[in-house]
Protein backbone atom coordinates (compact mmCIF):
# COMPACT_ATOMS: atom_id res chain seq x y z
CA UNK A 1 0.00 0.00 0.00
CA UNK A 2 1.42 3.39 -0.95
CA UNK A 3 2.22 5.83 1.85
CA UNK A 4 0.15 8.98 1.12
CA UNK A 5 2.47 11.14 3.24
CA UNK A 6 5.66 10.09 1.47
CA UNK A 7 6.90 12.90 -0.85
CA UNK A 8 7.25 12.11 -4.52
CA UNK A 9 10.81 12.74 -5.68
CA UNK A 10 13.69 10.94 -7.31
CA UNK A 11 17.29 10.87 -6.13
CA UNK A 12 18.31 11.36 -9.74
CA UNK A 13 18.52 14.62 -11.64
CA UNK A 14 20.90 16.33 -9.24
CA UNK A 15 19.00 15.62 -5.99
CA UNK A 16 21.11 16.21 -2.86
CA UNK A 17 20.80 14.70 0.59
CA UNK A 18 21.81 16.76 3.64
CA UNK A 19 22.31 15.65 7.22
CA UNK A 20 21.42 18.51 9.56
CA UNK A 21 22.19 19.04 13.19
CA UNK A 22 21.59 22.30 15.11
CA UNK A 23 22.61 24.79 12.42
CA UNK A 24 19.17 25.30 10.77
CA UNK A 25 17.70 26.36 14.16
CA UNK A 26 20.70 28.68 14.66
CA UNK A 27 20.11 30.14 11.18
CA UNK A 28 16.46 30.77 12.10
CA UNK A 29 17.68 32.81 15.08
CA UNK A 30 20.12 34.72 12.84
CA UNK A 31 17.21 35.62 10.56
CA UNK A 32 15.04 36.73 13.49
CA UNK A 33 17.89 38.94 14.65
CA UNK A 34 18.33 40.31 11.13
CA UNK A 35 22.08 39.77 10.77
CA UNK A 36 22.23 39.77 6.95
CA UNK A 37 19.95 42.81 6.49
CA UNK A 38 21.62 44.86 9.24
CA UNK A 39 25.18 44.22 8.09
CA UNK A 40 24.34 44.85 4.41
CA UNK A 41 22.63 48.13 5.30
CA UNK A 42 25.55 49.37 7.40
CA UNK A 43 28.28 48.04 5.09
CA UNK A 44 27.29 48.96 1.52
CA UNK A 45 29.54 47.27 -1.05
CA UNK A 46 29.39 45.96 -4.62
CA UNK A 47 31.09 42.66 -3.84
CA UNK A 48 29.87 39.37 -5.29
CA UNK A 49 29.03 38.09 -1.82
CA UNK A 50 27.42 40.62 0.49
CA UNK A 51 29.09 41.23 3.89
CA UNK A 52 25.87 40.17 5.62
CA UNK A 53 26.05 36.71 4.06
CA UNK A 54 29.73 36.47 5.04
CA UNK A 55 28.99 37.39 8.65
CA UNK A 56 26.14 34.88 8.97
CA UNK A 57 28.27 32.17 7.33
CA UNK A 58 31.11 32.82 9.78
CA UNK A 59 28.71 32.88 12.74
CA UNK A 60 27.25 29.51 11.75
CA UNK A 61 30.74 28.15 11.10
CA UNK A 62 31.70 29.25 14.61
CA UNK A 63 28.62 27.58 16.09
CA UNK A 64 29.37 24.41 14.15
CA UNK A 65 32.43 23.87 16.35
CA UNK A 66 35.06 24.79 13.78
CA UNK A 67 37.47 27.70 13.80
CA UNK A 68 35.95 30.88 12.35
CA UNK A 69 37.47 32.38 9.19
CA UNK A 70 39.47 29.35 8.09
CA UNK A 71 37.95 26.75 5.77
CA UNK A 72 34.54 28.46 5.64
CA UNK A 73 34.17 27.48 1.97
CA UNK A 74 35.10 23.90 2.87
CA UNK A 75 32.55 23.94 5.68
CA UNK A 76 29.78 25.23 3.36
CA UNK A 77 30.46 22.54 0.74
CA UNK A 78 28.70 20.01 2.99
CA UNK A 79 25.82 22.33 3.90
CA UNK A 80 22.53 23.40 2.34
CA UNK A 81 23.71 26.97 1.73
CA UNK A 82 20.32 28.35 0.71
CA UNK A 83 18.70 26.88 3.85
CA UNK A 84 21.35 28.39 6.15
CA UNK A 85 21.95 31.74 4.42
CA UNK A 86 18.71 32.37 2.54
CA UNK A 87 20.46 32.60 -0.83
CA UNK A 88 21.65 29.89 -3.17
CA UNK A 89 25.34 30.56 -3.74
CA UNK A 90 28.28 28.30 -4.52
CA UNK A 91 30.57 27.50 -1.59
CA UNK A 92 33.54 28.83 -3.57
CA UNK A 93 32.14 32.37 -3.19
CA UNK A 94 33.17 32.19 0.47
CA UNK A 95 36.88 31.77 -0.19
CA UNK A 96 39.52 33.43 1.98
CA UNK A 97 39.94 36.35 -0.44
CA UNK A 98 36.25 37.31 -0.39
CA UNK A 99 36.09 36.86 3.37
CA UNK A 100 39.13 39.09 3.88
CA UNK A 101 37.67 41.82 1.62
CA UNK A 102 34.37 41.67 3.52
CA UNK A 103 36.17 41.91 6.85
CA UNK A 104 38.09 44.98 5.68
CA UNK A 105 34.83 46.65 4.56
CA UNK A 106 33.14 45.79 7.87
CA UNK A 107 36.04 47.31 9.82
CA UNK A 108 35.82 50.57 7.85
CA UNK A 109 32.09 50.82 8.52
CA UNK A 110 32.54 50.15 12.25
CA UNK A 111 32.02 46.94 14.18
CA UNK A 112 30.60 48.88 17.11
CA UNK A 113 27.71 50.20 14.99
CA UNK A 114 26.86 46.70 13.81
CA UNK A 115 26.93 45.17 17.29
CA UNK A 116 24.97 48.12 18.67
CA UNK A 117 22.13 47.74 16.15
CA UNK A 118 22.00 43.96 16.49
CA UNK A 119 21.99 44.36 20.28
CA UNK A 120 18.96 46.65 19.94
CA UNK A 121 17.36 44.07 17.65
CA UNK A 122 17.90 41.40 20.31
CA UNK A 123 16.14 43.63 22.87
CA UNK A 124 13.17 44.13 20.56
CA UNK A 125 12.84 40.69 19.02
CA UNK A 126 13.41 38.64 22.18
CA UNK A 127 12.08 40.91 24.92
CA UNK A 128 15.30 40.94 26.93
CA UNK A 129 15.34 42.10 30.54
CA UNK A 130 17.80 44.99 30.73
CA UNK A 131 17.42 45.75 34.43
CA UNK A 132 20.92 44.30 35.06
CA UNK A 133 23.76 45.37 32.74
CA UNK A 134 26.85 43.26 33.46
CA UNK A 135 30.30 44.27 32.25
CA UNK A 136 33.63 42.43 32.14
CA UNK A 137 36.68 41.85 29.95
CA UNK A 138 38.92 38.94 29.06
CA UNK A 139 42.13 38.33 27.13
CA UNK A 140 42.46 36.20 23.99
CA UNK A 141 45.88 34.81 23.09
CA UNK A 142 47.31 34.97 19.57
CA UNK A 143 50.25 33.23 17.90
CA UNK A 144 52.63 35.38 15.94
CA UNK A 145 54.94 38.37 16.32
CA UNK A 146 52.62 41.17 15.08
CA UNK A 147 55.68 43.40 14.77
CA UNK A 148 53.62 46.13 13.11
CA UNK A 149 51.86 46.70 16.43
CA UNK A 150 55.21 47.65 17.98
CA UNK A 151 55.60 50.69 15.73
CA UNK A 152 55.10 54.21 16.96
CA UNK A 153 52.04 54.44 14.69
CA UNK A 154 50.53 50.94 14.71
CA UNK A 155 47.97 49.87 12.07
CA UNK A 156 44.26 50.46 12.82
CA UNK A 157 42.48 47.97 15.04
CA UNK A 158 43.30 46.55 18.47
CA UNK A 159 47.02 46.66 19.24
CA UNK A 160 48.16 43.07 19.73
CA UNK A 161 50.53 43.32 22.66
CA UNK A 162 51.81 41.60 25.76
CA UNK A 163 49.60 42.39 28.74
CA UNK A 164 48.14 40.91 31.88
CA UNK A 165 47.13 37.48 30.62
CA UNK A 166 44.06 36.12 32.37
CA UNK A 167 45.00 32.69 30.98
CA UNK A 168 48.47 32.79 32.61
CA UNK A 169 50.14 32.85 29.18
CA UNK A 170 52.48 35.81 29.53
CA UNK A 171 54.63 34.36 26.73
CA UNK A 172 51.93 35.06 24.14
CA UNK A 173 50.67 38.36 22.81
CA UNK A 174 46.98 39.04 23.18
CA UNK A 175 44.02 41.27 22.50
CA UNK A 176 41.10 41.92 24.84
CA UNK A 177 37.35 41.47 24.42
CA UNK A 178 34.80 43.39 26.47
CA UNK A 179 31.18 42.36 26.93
CA UNK A 180 28.08 44.12 28.19
CA UNK A 181 25.42 41.49 28.94
CA UNK A 182 21.76 41.69 29.98
CA UNK A 183 19.12 39.15 30.97
CA UNK A 184 21.76 37.13 32.81
CA UNK A 185 24.29 36.47 30.01
CA UNK A 186 23.08 37.72 26.60
CA UNK A 187 25.70 40.09 25.11
CA UNK A 188 24.21 43.24 23.59
CA UNK A 189 27.42 45.24 23.20
CA UNK A 190 31.11 44.45 22.98
CA UNK A 191 34.42 45.46 21.43
CA UNK A 192 37.96 44.26 20.96
CA UNK A 193 40.56 46.24 22.92
CA UNK A 194 44.35 46.59 22.91
CA UNK A 195 46.22 43.69 24.48
CA UNK A 196 47.58 45.81 27.31
CA UNK A 197 44.30 47.62 28.05
CA UNK A 198 43.56 48.44 31.66
CA UNK A 199 40.31 47.08 33.09
CA UNK A 200 39.99 50.32 35.04
CA UNK A 201 40.20 52.41 31.86
CA UNK A 202 37.84 50.15 29.91
CA UNK A 203 35.32 50.38 32.76
CA UNK A 204 35.53 54.15 32.60
CA UNK A 205 34.90 54.11 28.86
CA UNK A 206 31.91 51.77 29.22
CA UNK A 207 30.47 53.91 32.03
CA UNK A 208 30.57 56.88 29.68
CA UNK A 209 28.56 54.91 27.06
CA UNK A 210 26.28 52.56 28.97
CA UNK A 211 23.67 55.21 29.79
CA UNK A 212 23.19 56.00 26.09
CA UNK A 213 23.25 52.32 25.10
CA UNK A 214 20.55 51.41 27.58
CA UNK A 215 18.50 54.53 26.80
CA UNK A 216 18.42 53.44 23.14
CA UNK A 217 16.68 50.31 24.38
CA UNK A 218 14.10 52.15 26.47
CA UNK A 219 15.93 52.03 29.81
CA UNK A 220 16.53 55.47 31.24
CA UNK A 221 18.13 56.70 34.45
CA UNK A 222 17.41 54.41 37.39
CA UNK A 223 15.88 51.68 35.19
CA UNK A 224 18.99 49.48 35.18
CA UNK A 225 21.89 48.53 37.45
CA UNK A 226 25.47 48.44 36.20
CA UNK A 227 27.34 45.41 37.61
CA UNK A 228 31.12 45.17 37.34
CA UNK A 229 34.11 43.68 39.14
CA UNK A 230 36.48 45.54 41.45
CA UNK A 231 38.32 47.26 38.56
CA UNK A 232 35.44 49.74 38.50
CA UNK A 233 36.50 51.29 41.83
CA UNK A 234 38.62 54.30 40.90
CA UNK A 235 38.05 58.00 41.47
CA UNK A 236 37.22 58.87 37.82
CA UNK A 237 35.02 55.79 37.41
CA UNK A 238 32.96 56.65 40.47
CA UNK A 239 32.50 60.17 39.11
CA UNK A 240 31.14 58.72 35.85
CA UNK A 241 28.74 56.53 37.83
CA UNK A 242 27.06 59.37 39.74
CA UNK A 243 23.90 59.07 37.61
CA UNK A 244 24.07 55.27 37.26
CA UNK A 245 23.00 52.70 39.82
CA UNK A 246 25.85 50.24 40.31
CA UNK A 247 27.05 47.22 42.29
CA UNK A 248 30.70 46.28 42.47
CA UNK A 249 33.19 44.67 44.82
CA UNK A 250 35.43 46.87 46.95
CA UNK A 251 39.06 45.76 46.47
CA UNK A 252 40.94 44.50 49.52
CA UNK A 253 43.73 47.03 48.99
CA UNK A 254 41.39 49.82 50.14
CA UNK A 255 41.65 50.39 53.90
CA UNK A 256 37.89 50.94 54.07
CA UNK A 257 37.41 47.33 52.97
CA UNK A 258 39.37 46.03 55.96
CA UNK A 259 37.60 48.43 58.32
CA UNK A 260 34.19 47.28 57.12
CA UNK A 261 35.12 43.63 57.63
CA UNK A 262 36.49 44.41 61.11
CA UNK A 263 33.20 46.10 62.04
CA UNK A 264 31.25 43.08 60.83
CA UNK A 265 33.49 40.61 62.67
CA UNK A 266 33.24 42.49 65.99
CA UNK A 267 29.52 43.25 65.79
CA UNK A 268 28.27 39.69 65.39
CA UNK A 269 25.03 41.11 63.94
CA UNK A 270 24.83 39.07 60.76
CA UNK A 271 21.81 38.66 58.51
CA UNK A 272 21.42 35.06 57.33
CA UNK A 273 20.97 34.87 53.55
CA UNK A 274 21.32 31.13 53.03
CA UNK A 275 22.28 29.23 49.88
CA UNK A 276 22.08 31.10 46.57
CA UNK A 277 23.73 28.59 44.23
CA UNK A 278 21.73 27.21 41.33
CA UNK A 279 21.56 23.52 40.59
CA UNK A 280 21.41 20.34 42.61
CA UNK A 281 23.40 19.93 45.80
CA UNK A 282 26.41 17.64 45.34
CA UNK A 283 28.74 16.11 47.92
CA UNK A 284 31.70 16.73 45.59
CA UNK A 285 30.75 20.40 45.14
CA UNK A 286 29.49 21.79 48.45
CA UNK A 287 27.29 24.87 48.23
CA UNK A 288 28.22 28.06 50.00
CA UNK A 289 25.97 29.53 52.65
CA UNK A 290 25.99 33.30 52.98
CA UNK A 291 25.40 35.86 55.70
CA UNK A 292 25.75 39.63 55.47
CA UNK A 293 26.34 42.75 57.52
CA UNK A 294 25.18 46.22 56.46
CA UNK A 295 27.55 49.16 56.90
CA UNK A 296 28.97 52.08 54.94
CA UNK A 297 32.31 53.19 53.51
CA UNK A 298 33.80 56.48 52.41
CA UNK A 299 35.75 56.30 49.15
CA UNK A 300 37.31 59.37 47.49
CA UNK A 301 35.41 61.66 49.84
CA UNK A 302 31.95 60.18 49.13
CA UNK A 303 29.84 57.80 51.17
CA UNK A 304 28.58 54.52 49.71
CA UNK A 305 26.58 51.60 50.95
CA UNK A 306 28.71 48.57 51.87
CA UNK A 307 27.52 45.00 52.35
CA UNK A 308 30.02 42.74 54.08
CA UNK A 309 29.31 39.23 52.84
CA UNK A 310 30.61 36.04 54.46
CA UNK A 311 30.74 32.76 52.56
CA UNK A 312 30.99 29.43 54.36
CA UNK A 313 33.47 28.36 51.67
CA UNK A 314 36.63 30.31 52.39
CA UNK A 315 38.43 32.03 49.58
CA UNK A 316 41.33 29.68 48.72
CA UNK A 317 44.02 32.34 48.56
CA UNK A 318 42.96 34.04 51.78
CA UNK A 319 42.55 30.65 53.47
CA UNK A 320 46.14 29.72 52.58
CA UNK A 321 47.32 33.11 53.81
CA UNK A 322 45.59 32.48 57.13
CA UNK A 323 47.21 29.04 57.38
CA UNK A 324 50.63 30.66 56.90
CA UNK A 325 49.90 33.22 59.60
CA UNK A 326 48.83 30.48 62.03
CA UNK A 327 52.01 28.54 61.29
CA UNK A 328 54.19 31.63 61.76
CA UNK A 329 52.44 32.41 65.05
CA UNK A 330 53.12 28.86 66.33
CA UNK A 331 56.80 29.09 65.32
CA UNK A 332 57.13 32.39 67.19
CA UNK A 333 55.63 30.84 70.34
CA UNK A 334 58.10 27.94 70.22
CA UNK A 335 61.02 30.30 69.53
CA UNK A 336 60.20 32.60 72.46
CA UNK A 337 59.49 29.74 74.88
CA UNK A 338 62.92 28.22 74.20
CA UNK A 339 64.54 31.46 75.39
CA UNK A 340 63.14 30.97 78.92
CA UNK A 341 65.28 28.90 81.33
CA UNK A 342 63.63 25.63 82.26
CA UNK A 343 65.03 25.13 85.82
CA UNK A 344 64.88 27.33 88.93
CA UNK A 345 66.05 26.78 92.52
CA UNK A 346 63.54 29.28 93.89
CA UNK A 347 59.83 28.68 93.50
CA UNK A 348 59.12 32.41 93.44
CA UNK A 349 61.50 32.82 90.49
CA UNK A 350 59.82 29.93 88.65
CA UNK A 351 56.38 31.36 89.23
CA UNK A 352 57.55 34.78 88.02
CA UNK A 353 58.98 33.23 84.82
CA UNK A 354 55.71 31.40 84.14
CA UNK A 355 53.70 34.56 84.76
CA UNK A 356 55.90 36.57 82.40
CA UNK A 357 55.64 33.90 79.71
CA UNK A 358 51.86 33.76 79.95
CA UNK A 359 51.71 37.54 79.57
CA UNK A 360 53.45 37.37 76.19
CA UNK A 361 51.10 38.25 73.33
CA UNK A 362 50.95 36.35 70.05
CA UNK A 363 48.39 36.79 67.22
CA UNK A 364 46.72 33.39 67.49
CA UNK A 365 48.37 31.51 70.38
CA UNK A 366 49.16 31.81 74.05
CA UNK A 367 51.59 30.06 76.41
CA UNK A 368 50.50 27.98 79.35
CA UNK A 369 53.26 27.12 81.85
CA UNK A 370 53.40 24.49 84.57
CA UNK A 371 55.88 23.96 87.44
CA UNK A 372 57.05 20.59 88.71
CA UNK A 373 59.15 20.21 91.89
CA UNK A 374 62.09 17.79 92.10
CA UNK A 375 65.30 17.26 94.09
CA UNK A 376 68.83 17.80 92.95
CA UNK A 377 72.18 17.46 94.71
CA UNK A 378 73.34 20.56 96.53
CA UNK A 379 76.42 22.32 95.34
CA UNK A 380 79.85 21.19 96.49
CA UNK A 381 81.58 17.81 96.91
CA UNK A 382 80.26 15.80 99.86
CA UNK A 383 82.72 14.16 102.34
CA UNK A 384 83.27 10.43 102.27
CA UNK A 385 81.46 10.02 105.59
CA UNK A 386 78.54 12.39 104.98
CA UNK A 387 75.59 11.67 102.71
CA UNK A 388 75.24 14.20 99.86
CA UNK A 389 72.76 16.94 100.67
CA UNK A 390 69.77 17.47 98.33
CA UNK A 391 67.87 20.62 97.51
CA UNK A 392 64.58 21.44 95.81
CA UNK A 393 64.51 22.48 92.11
CA UNK A 394 61.59 23.77 90.05
CA UNK A 395 61.29 22.72 86.41
CA UNK A 396 59.13 24.70 84.01
CA UNK A 397 57.34 23.23 80.98
CA UNK A 398 55.29 25.13 78.47
CA UNK A 399 52.28 24.19 76.34
CA UNK A 400 50.92 26.15 73.39
CA UNK A 401 47.20 26.88 73.04
CA UNK A 402 45.26 28.48 70.19
CA UNK A 403 43.34 31.63 71.02
CA UNK A 404 40.11 30.28 69.55
CA UNK A 405 38.38 33.63 69.60
CA UNK A 406 41.12 35.25 67.48
CA UNK A 407 41.36 32.29 65.09
CA UNK A 408 37.61 32.22 64.54
CA UNK A 409 37.57 35.96 63.86
CA UNK A 410 40.31 35.61 61.27
CA UNK A 411 38.55 32.67 59.66
CA UNK A 412 35.42 34.77 59.56
CA UNK A 413 37.29 37.64 57.90
CA UNK A 414 38.99 35.26 55.44
CA UNK A 415 35.57 34.26 54.14
CA UNK A 416 34.40 37.86 53.73
CA UNK A 417 34.25 40.26 50.82
CA UNK A 418 32.66 43.70 50.57
CA UNK A 419 30.08 44.80 48.01
CA UNK A 420 29.90 48.51 47.34
CA UNK A 421 26.87 50.24 45.85
CA UNK A 422 24.97 53.50 45.57
CA UNK A 423 21.63 51.63 45.73
CA UNK A 424 19.68 52.21 48.92
CA UNK A 425 18.19 49.36 50.94
CA UNK A 426 14.64 50.68 50.56
CA UNK A 427 12.59 52.86 48.27
CA UNK A 428 11.24 52.24 44.78
CA UNK A 429 14.59 51.15 43.34
CA UNK A 430 15.98 49.83 46.62
CA UNK A 431 17.52 46.40 47.19
CA UNK A 432 17.81 44.47 50.41
CA UNK A 433 21.07 42.68 51.21
CA UNK A 434 20.05 39.39 49.63
CA UNK A 435 18.98 41.02 46.35
CA UNK A 436 22.19 43.04 46.22
CA UNK A 437 24.26 39.88 46.63
CA UNK A 438 22.20 37.99 44.05
CA UNK A 439 22.71 40.87 41.62
CA UNK A 440 26.48 40.74 42.01
CA UNK A 441 26.72 36.96 41.98
CA UNK A 442 25.05 36.95 38.58
CA UNK A 443 28.38 38.26 37.27
CA UNK A 444 29.56 34.65 36.97
CA UNK A 445 27.32 34.32 33.91
CA UNK A 446 29.49 36.85 32.03
CA UNK A 447 32.61 34.93 33.05
CA UNK A 448 30.99 31.76 31.68
CA UNK A 449 30.67 33.58 28.35
CA UNK A 450 34.43 33.99 28.26
CA UNK A 451 34.92 30.24 28.28
CA UNK A 452 32.79 30.19 25.09
CA UNK A 453 34.84 32.94 23.46
CA UNK A 454 38.12 31.18 24.28
CA UNK A 455 37.04 27.61 23.62
CA UNK A 456 39.93 26.17 21.55
CA UNK A 457 37.45 24.16 19.47
CA UNK A 458 35.81 27.41 18.38
CA UNK A 459 38.62 29.97 18.40
CA UNK A 460 41.57 27.65 17.76
CA UNK A 461 44.88 29.53 17.46
CA UNK A 462 43.87 32.97 16.28
CA UNK A 463 46.30 34.11 13.59
CA UNK A 464 45.13 36.95 11.35
CA UNK A 465 47.32 39.22 9.29
CA UNK A 466 46.02 42.57 10.48
CA UNK A 467 44.63 43.93 13.78
CA UNK A 468 41.61 45.30 11.88
CA UNK A 469 40.56 41.77 10.94
CA UNK A 470 41.05 40.68 14.53
CA UNK A 471 38.52 43.35 15.48
CA UNK A 472 36.04 41.91 12.98
CA UNK A 473 36.75 38.41 14.31
CA UNK A 474 35.91 39.72 17.78
CA UNK A 475 32.58 40.97 16.44
CA UNK A 476 31.89 37.56 14.86
CA UNK A 477 32.62 35.81 18.16
CA UNK A 478 30.32 38.16 20.09
CA UNK A 479 27.52 37.67 17.54
CA UNK A 480 27.97 33.90 17.75
CA UNK A 481 27.74 34.13 21.52
CA UNK A 482 24.61 36.30 21.19
CA UNK A 483 22.85 33.64 19.09
CA UNK A 484 24.03 30.88 21.45
CA UNK A 485 22.68 32.66 24.52
CA UNK A 486 19.41 33.72 22.86
CA UNK A 487 18.69 30.08 22.08
CA UNK A 488 19.43 29.10 25.68
CA UNK A 489 17.26 31.98 26.92
CA UNK A 490 14.31 30.71 24.88
CA UNK A 491 14.77 27.14 26.12
CA UNK A 492 14.66 28.25 29.75
CA UNK A 493 11.85 30.72 29.14
CA UNK A 494 9.78 27.88 27.68
CA UNK A 495 10.39 25.70 30.74
CA UNK A 496 9.54 28.58 33.07
CA UNK A 497 6.30 29.44 31.26
CA UNK A 498 5.05 25.89 30.65
CA UNK A 499 6.45 24.27 33.82
CA UNK A 500 7.47 21.38 31.59
CA UNK A 501 11.13 20.28 31.87
CA UNK A 502 13.08 19.08 28.84
CA UNK A 503 15.08 15.86 28.38
CA UNK A 504 18.60 16.49 29.70
CA UNK A 505 21.65 14.37 30.40
CA UNK A 506 21.36 10.63 31.06
CA UNK A 507 17.69 10.65 30.02
CA UNK A 508 16.81 12.79 33.04
CA UNK A 509 14.48 15.77 32.76
CA UNK A 510 15.94 19.20 33.45
CA UNK A 511 14.58 22.65 34.24
CA UNK A 512 17.90 24.25 33.22
CA UNK A 513 18.44 23.23 29.58
CA UNK A 514 21.46 24.65 27.77
CA UNK A 515 22.23 25.31 24.13
CA UNK A 516 25.01 22.74 24.23
CA UNK A 517 22.52 20.21 25.56
CA UNK A 518 20.29 21.03 22.60
CA UNK A 519 23.12 20.50 20.10
CA UNK A 520 23.67 16.97 21.42
CA UNK A 521 19.98 16.17 20.88
CA UNK A 522 19.60 17.78 17.46
CA UNK A 523 21.55 15.21 15.40
CA UNK A 524 21.09 13.42 12.07
CA UNK A 525 17.93 15.07 10.73
CA UNK A 526 17.99 14.27 7.00
CA UNK A 527 16.49 16.21 4.11
CA UNK A 528 16.66 15.85 0.37
CA UNK A 529 16.72 18.76 -2.08
CA UNK A 530 15.07 17.70 -5.33
CA UNK A 531 13.43 19.76 -8.09
CA UNK A 532 13.98 22.92 -6.04
CA UNK A 533 12.05 21.62 -3.01
CA UNK A 534 13.18 20.15 0.30
CA UNK A 535 11.67 17.08 1.89
CA UNK A 536 12.34 15.45 5.24
CA UNK A 537 13.49 11.87 4.78
CA UNK A 538 14.43 11.45 8.43
CA UNK A 539 12.09 13.59 10.47
CA UNK A 540 12.92 14.95 13.95
CA UNK A 541 12.41 12.53 16.82
CA UNK A 542 10.05 13.20 19.71
CA UNK A 543 12.89 14.64 21.81
CA UNK A 544 14.05 16.83 18.93
CA UNK A 545 10.51 18.13 18.42
CA UNK A 546 10.32 19.03 22.13
CA UNK A 547 13.46 21.14 21.73
CA UNK A 548 12.29 22.70 18.46
CA UNK A 549 8.99 23.70 20.07
CA UNK A 550 10.83 25.15 23.07
CA UNK A 551 12.97 27.19 20.65
CA UNK A 552 9.87 28.57 18.94
CA UNK A 553 10.52 26.50 15.81
CA UNK A 554 8.99 23.60 13.89
CA UNK A 555 10.23 20.83 11.65
CA UNK A 556 9.82 23.24 8.71
CA UNK A 557 13.01 24.90 9.99
CA UNK A 558 14.88 22.14 8.11
CA UNK A 559 13.04 22.80 4.82
CA UNK A 560 12.19 26.52 4.71
CA UNK A 561 15.07 28.99 3.96
CA UNK A 562 12.91 31.80 5.40
CA UNK A 563 12.10 30.07 8.70
CA UNK A 564 12.39 32.32 11.75
CA UNK A 565 11.98 31.56 15.42
CA UNK A 566 8.92 32.79 17.29
CA UNK A 567 10.11 33.91 20.76
CA UNK A 568 7.73 33.39 23.67
CA UNK A 569 8.00 36.94 25.00
CA UNK A 570 6.17 37.53 28.31
CA UNK A 571 3.19 39.90 28.05
CA UNK A 572 4.61 42.44 30.49
CA UNK A 573 7.72 42.81 28.31
CA UNK A 574 5.65 43.06 25.13
CA UNK A 575 3.54 45.80 26.71
CA UNK A 576 6.64 47.62 27.88
CA UNK A 577 8.13 47.51 24.42
Image (cartoon, helix red, strand yellow):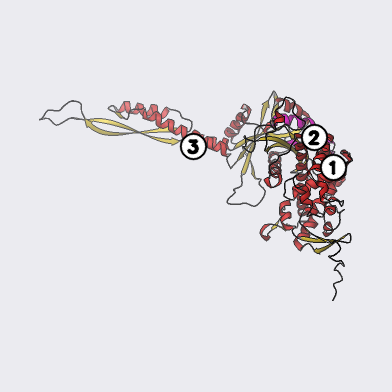
N-terminal of the pair, mark 1 or mark 3, is 1
User: Was residue 219 drawn as part of the magenta stretch in this picture?
Assistant: yes
Mark 3 falls on what kind of element?
Answer: helix
Q: Residues within 10 Å of mark 3 (few under 14, many from 20)?
A: few
Give the mark toward the camera: 1 or 3: 1
Circles 1, 3 touching at the beta carbon (< 8 Å): no
Residue 51: give its label: 1
Observer-nearest of 80 and 397: 80
Residue 222: give its label: 2
Residue appearing at x 62%, y 51% in the figure: 281
**Label 3 to label 2: alpha-carbon separation:** 46 Å
Please tell me in which quadrant of the rendered image residue 544 appears.
Answer: bottom right
Residue appearing at x 85%, y 41% in the figure: 39
Please tell me in which quadrant of the rendered image residue 310 appears.
Answer: top right
Mark 2 falls on what kind of element?
Answer: loop
Mark 1 falls on what kind of element?
Answer: helix
User: Was residue 563 drawn as part of the magenta stretch in this picture?
Assistant: no
Which residue carries the number 3 mark?
404
Amino acid sequence: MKNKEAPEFSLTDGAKVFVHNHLPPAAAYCRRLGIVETVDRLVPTKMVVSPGLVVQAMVLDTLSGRSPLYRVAEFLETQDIELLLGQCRPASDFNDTNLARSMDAIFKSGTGRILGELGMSAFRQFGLDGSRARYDTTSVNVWGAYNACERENPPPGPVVHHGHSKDKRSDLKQFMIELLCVDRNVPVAGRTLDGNSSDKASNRDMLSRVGRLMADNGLGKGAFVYVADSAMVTGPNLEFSEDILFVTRLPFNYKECGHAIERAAHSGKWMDIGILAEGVKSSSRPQARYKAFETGVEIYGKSYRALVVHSSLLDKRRSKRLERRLSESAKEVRRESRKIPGRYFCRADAEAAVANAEKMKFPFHKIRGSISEAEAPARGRPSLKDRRKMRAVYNISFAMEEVKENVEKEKLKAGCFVLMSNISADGESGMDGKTLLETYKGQYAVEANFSFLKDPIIVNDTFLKTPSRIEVLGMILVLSLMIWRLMEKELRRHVEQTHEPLPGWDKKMTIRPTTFMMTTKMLAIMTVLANGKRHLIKAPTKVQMLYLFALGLSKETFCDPESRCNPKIPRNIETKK
